[in-house]
Image (cartoon, rainbow, N blue to C red):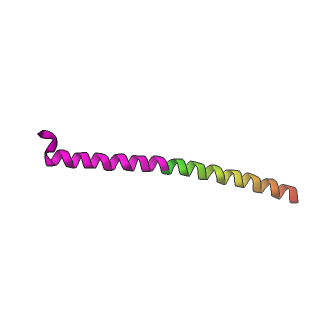
Amino acid sequence: MKEQEPSNLVQADVNDVLDNLTASVASLTRQLAISQSQVLTLQRRLKELEAKTK
């Protein structure tokens, strides 16, 4: 019966929200790392092209 008490249900909801937020943060962190890597690659390629045109 204790599992059905309102405070336990609220805690379960809070835990679900925190789990979802943690997963979202992890996903966004991965996406940021990919984007940063792409930017660095583009910057390197741009420098290479600029060096070829000089």
Residue drawn 40% across the image and 46% down it: 22
18 drawn magenta: yes
Boundaries of the magenta span: 1-27
In the picture shown, does residue 24 fall above or below 53?
A: above
Horizontal side of residue 46 vs 27, given as left or right: right
Horizontal side of residue 43 vs 1, given as left or right: right
Between 3 and 47, the residue placed more toward the observer is 3
The quarter in which the C terminus is drawn is bottom right
Residue drawn 26% across the image and 49% down it: 13
Horizontal side of residue 1 vs 25, given as left or right: left
Between 47 and 23, the residue placed more toward the observer is 23
How many dots with numbers? Answer: 0
The quarter in which the N terminus is drawn is top left
Residue drawn 21% across the image and 49% down it: 10
Between 4 and 22, the residue placed more toward the observer is 4
Q: Main secondary structure of the magenta part?
A: helix
Horizontal side of residue 22 vs 5, given as left or right: right
- How far across and how far down the image is residue 43, in percent? 71, 55
- How far across and how far down the image is residue 4, in percent? 15, 44
Looking at this view, name the residue that lies furthest to the left.
1
22 drawn magenta: yes
Residue drawn 50% across the image and 48% down it: 29
- How far across and how far down the image is residue 45, in percent? 76, 53
- How far across and how far down the image is residue 35, in percent? 60, 53
